[in-house]
Amino acid sequence: MKPEKKQIYKQKALELVSKMTLEEKAGQMLYNAPAIPRLGIPFYNWWNEALHGVARAGTATVFPQAIGLAAMFDSETLHKTADIISTEGRVKYNLFKEEDDRDIYKGLTFWSPNINIFRDPRWGRGHETYGEDPFLSAELGKAFVKGLQGDDEDFLKSAACAKHFAVHSGPESVRHSFNVEIGMQDLYETYLYAFKELCDDGVEGFMGAYNAVNGEPCCGSKTLLDDILRRDWGFDGYVTSDCGALRDFNEHHKVTKTVNESVALAVKNGCDLNCGAMYCHILSAINEGLICEEDIDKCVTRLMETRLRLGILGDVQTQYDSLDYPLLCCDKHIESALDTAKKSMVLLENDGILPLDRSKTKSIAVIGPNADSRLSLIGNYHGTADRYVTALEGIQDYVGKDVRINYAVGCDIFSDKTEGLALPDDRISEAVIAAKHSDVVMLCLGLNELLEGEEGDANNFSASGDKENLSLPVVQQKLLDRVLAVGKPTVVVLFSGSALAVEDSRINALIQAWYPGQQGGTALSEILFGDFSPCGKLPVTFYKSCDDLPSFTDYDMNGRTYRYFEKEALYPFGFGLSYASFEYSNLTVSDSDIANGESVTVSVNIKNTSNIDAWEKSQLYISFDDRTNDLPIRSLKGFRAVFLKANEQKTINFNLQSNAFGLFDQDGKLKLNSGNYTIHVGGSQPDDKSVKLLEKSPLTIKVNI
């Protein structure tokens, strides 16, 4: 939206707020803001979710969970996905409004995306994010926000919200009281980077985090909200608390003594909206002299600006008002859900068993607790699909009656038996029988949103939604061992939102399917039988064990993520196999004066050297040759999704601004260090494990600054 248009809305908001009583203004700072009929302001519930589809308000297209969308390494496809989500959001808003239904999850202020850094694989909410890399998170976050908010010069299609500002990434069990002690380098280089990028790119909202940072609760932090977000970054949108976070100020963080003091801390530092009920005490805080009406005016004006930008206040017409029911879950949107599911899956191992030859396959055993589970498809913060296709259903639909499918659940997702009166491991022998009577085995294991997720939502109460380790649940490990012992060719498909350490030489192929959305089973079957070449790349490092990592509560980046992890990974960030093969050549860099702010163009040729049409996800990393231990080993600075037909060659360009070579110092300042830098371009990182797994190295070229 153009600055001059924003200024018009600001003036309208100021005029509107000037007509409100103090009581009316205070009411507008609650997420369930009451109507003010005399001013033509209807009741509005700000709380809505759109992480990977319109959530929690009935039928909508369900895309892969965010971590799966990140594995696409494809900003363009993610932008299209977000545009579909906002279309369906507008459709639902328009229709609900006709029925005078303004309930929770039915507005146009979507509290998405989650751009926290997935710094530790134990974090249960990590699958809501775009992974462990700040640059990838920022680029994908910007694409998602642009898709949600649209390109209309006058109105927002919907309002995106970057969360959770800032630093939070577990543990869930202590999130209401935890204080992150963090240095400025890690803060700015890792935890704030994507938020700054989305702020600069026009995201409408920010949501604070539950935790404190360096002693300040995020939703009332002067440093984060006032100094950094408003003053340094110039953010002019609205800020909301996370739900129930303000009461943590006095109850858990103990930085205030009373409810009124907590309210005042949040309001004074620019938290405009309360998801919760603490702002019911605003008038009391004013009467106590802790805040004044001018403080309230600033907050309410920003909230009214957002509603005006959406075109949902006053007698106005937007191009989005005509979006209607036939667009909801239409064929085009379902096809997009299938496309994203296929692009998200990552092939981690393949000894040549895949793709399967349908003409030579007479029977397939489809086994596992996630083989016919809708929960394995959806992840958390999801909507309700009009049809789900599980792995079992997808394979059955694909092969028809030509191939016999032998199904066995094998075990529960977590419990040691499926029937209350049975002995432990009551379904494993059935799985063994199915495997023995089949040509090939498809073993669908992993987790679901009940085992990893948000505190209070997941059922693993002992860990509050976090994982305790990287292993499969014990009963699934037993199932894996027994089925592999049969000796049939076996493909293991992992449904999870985070890294699992599954390592067994008897596995012929391993696919990371994430939570692939409503079309997950169809996508999987097309990959298994070679209709689509897998092209997903890991947006997180798959570690061998938590023993290789620092403490879960240590937010220092040393020893974490591919940028600082010195040990060997099980599967590295950026890794993923294909059925096709690609050759990179002729890597060049333009002659530019980087030290004086000139941009650089990096060009490379990519050729598909196979007879299979396929997507390649090219990656560009920069490393500083004179690195010290406090600097990243390497950093992703560019990626491209490139479709190449068999034997086709293309030239792609990466345009790098000079700050792509910048390195953050201990004060959190981005600086260009003099010296030699190496640019790496290929289908993976240049680390030893990726080179070993792919049997090829990225191309490199030196740049001196």
Image (tube, grey):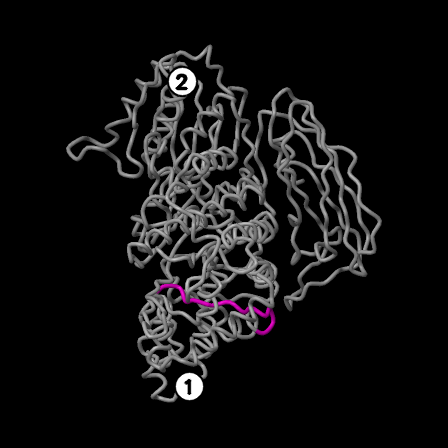
Stretch in magenta: 231-243
**Front-lying residue, 46 or 589:** 46
Residue drawn 45% across the image and 55% down it: 112
The mark found on residue 399 in the picture is 2
Q: Does 608 appear above or below 271?
A: above
In this view of the protein, can residue 42 be seen by the observer? yes
Query: Residue 456: x and y, percent?
Result: 31, 55
The mark found on residue 292 in the picture is 1
Residue 51 shown in magenta: no
Residue 234 shown in magenta: yes
Query: Residue 455: x and y, percent?
Result: 34, 55
Q: CA distance from mark 1 to mark 2?
A: 69 Å
Q: Amino acid at mark 2?
A: Val
Q: Is residue 135 left or right of residue 213?
A: right
Query: Residue 326: x and y, percent?
Result: 39, 40
**Front-lying residue, 278 or 635:** 278
Q: Does 648 appear above or below 161?
A: above
Disc 2 secondary structure class:
helix
Residue drawn 36% across the image and 64% down it: 243
**Front-lying residue, 75 or 675:** 75
In this view of the protein, can residue 541 be seen by the observer? no
Sequence order check, earlier mark of 1 and 2: 1
Is most of the magenta stretch helix, strand or loop? loop
**In which quadrant will I find the N terminus?**
bottom right
Residue 195 location, quadrant: bottom right
Q: Residues within 10 Å of mark 1 (few under 14, many from 20)?
A: some
Q: Amino acid at mark 1?
A: Cys
